[in-house]
Amino acid sequence: MRRWAAPAGLIRGKLLRNPGATFPAVAIAVVVTMLAGLTACGPVGARNPLRAGMAILFGSYGADTGLIGSSWWQAAVALSTVETYARVTGDMTYNSAIAGAFSLHSGSNFENDSNDDTAWWALTWLQAYDLTHAPAYLAMAETDADYIHEDWDGTCGGGVWWHRNPRSYKNAITNELFLELTASLHNHIPADTKYLSWARAEWSWFGRSGLINPSNLINDGLDGSCANNADVTWTYNQGVILAGLAQLYHATGNRSLLRTAQRIASAAIGKLTVGGVLAEPCERGSCAARLDTNTQSFKGIFVRDLKVLADTAGTGQFNSFFTRQAQAIEAYDTGNRHELGMFWGGPVGRVSSSTQASAVDALLASVRLP
C-alpha cells in the first residue's frame, strides 16, 4: 500500500484540497495479480472491468491515513465509490476502508473551512449507515449538516457560503450538496422536521438564485452582485442537483422535482458530451488550464447521481447513456494494468485515485439499469 505524506495545507489539523496521488507501480502490480480468479461482473464480463478497476482503486488506500489517495474531499468521493460498489455488487471486500476512515478522522468531525468538503464526507457517512446500520455514521452526518447550516444567511437571499472564515462565495456545489444531505437526512430520520425545512429552503433559494441558466445548465456560482457568474458548467454541478432533487422528491412526493431534474440531466447530456461520451467543457476548450486535480472526480459524480435520478424516477431514458460511458471507458480509457484515466473517450491520461474512482462510478452506473 502507498505511504501517505501530510498535505501541504492544514487548518486546525484538517486536510485541505491537494492533488490525488498517482498509483505506485508496486501497488498496481500486486492488485493485478489478484484479478485472474475474478468472476464476470460489469458491462463486459470477460475482462472484468468493474472488479479490476476496483482492485486498482483500492491499491491507493492507505491504512495509516484511512484515505484513498491524498486529497481530502476526493478521498470522501472515492470512499463513496467503494460503498456504491458494495451495494451494487454485494462484494464487501473493500469495506474496511469505511471503518478505517472513521476511526482515524472522526475526532475532527470531518469538518474544515470548506463547507463542500464537509458535505462530501457527510454524504459518505449516510451511505455507510445504509450499509452497516451503525448509528455513529448517521450521527456524524447530522453533526456535519448542522455545522454547514451555520453558514446559511440572507446574503443573496439565502444559501450556504462555500468558505467559512472568512465567508466567501455562494456557489452551486456547496448548496447542491446541502440540499442532498438535508433531504437525505430527513428520509433517514423518523418524524424529522428540521432537515426537511432546511432542504425545502435550500431548493426554494437555489431555484430562484439564477444559478440555473437559460440552457438548463448550472454555472459554478454567484458573483459579488449575486448574479450568475457565467463560470464553467462543470459536469459535477449538473450531477449533484439530480440526487438532491431525487431525495427531496422522496421526502415530499412532488413529481415536479423529478421533471426539473430530468431537464437538467438532458441538457447536460446534450451539451457536455463528445460522440456520446461525457466530457468537461474545458477538455477541448480555451479553459483547458483549469483541468486541475479537482476536476478529475467530476464526471463520475455526474453519472453516479444521474443513476440515482433514473432509479428514483423509474426511467430507462438514460440507459443508453450509461452503457455508452462504460463502453467508452473500456475501449479507450483503460490502461494495460486496468488503470482508468481522466478522459473517457481516450487517451488514457492523468491517472490517479480520483480518475479511477470516477470511471468506476460510471461502470457501476451501467449495472442494473432501470
Image (spheres, helix red, strand yellow):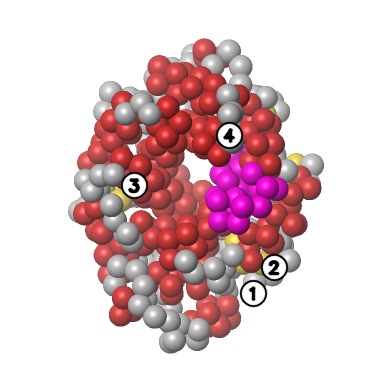
Q: Amino acid at mark 2?
A: Ala
- Residue picked out by circle 3: 311
Mark 4, secondary structure of its residue: loop
Q: Which mark is first along the chain, 3 or 2?
A: 2
Left or right of 270 on screen, residue 123: right
Q: Position of residue 55 (x, y in %)?
A: 50, 73
Give me the C-alpha separation between circle 2 and circle 4.
35 Å
Does the magenta-highlighted stretch encompass residue 251? Answer: no
Neighbour tally class for label 2: few under 14, some 14-19, many 20 plus, Cα within 10 Å: some
Labels 2 and 1 touching (C-beta < 8 A): yes
Residue in the picture at 47% in, 27% down: 221
Q: Write the residue at 54% across / 21% down.
A: 197
Query: Closer to the N terminus: mark 3 or mark 4?
Result: 4
Residue marked by disc 1: 1
Residues tagged 3 and 1 counted as in contact (Cβ below 8 A): no
Badge 4 crowding class, 10 Å Cα cut-off, few under 14, some 14 to 19, many 20 or more, is few
Of labels 2 and 3, the one closer to you: 3
Circle nearer the viewer, 2 or 1: 2
Front residue of this view, candidates 280 and 300: 300
Q: Is residue 300 visible?
A: yes
Q: Is residue 118 magenta?
A: yes
Instruction: Provide the residue span drawn in magenta.
Output: 113-138
**Which of the labelled discs sits on residue 239, or is there none?**
none
**Up/down of 111 relative to 358, above or below:** above
Residue on which disc 2 sits:
63
Residue that carries the numbered disc 4 in the rendered image: 190
Q: Are marks 2 and 4 in contact (CB under 8 Å)?
A: no
Q: CA distance from mark 2 to mark 3?
A: 34 Å
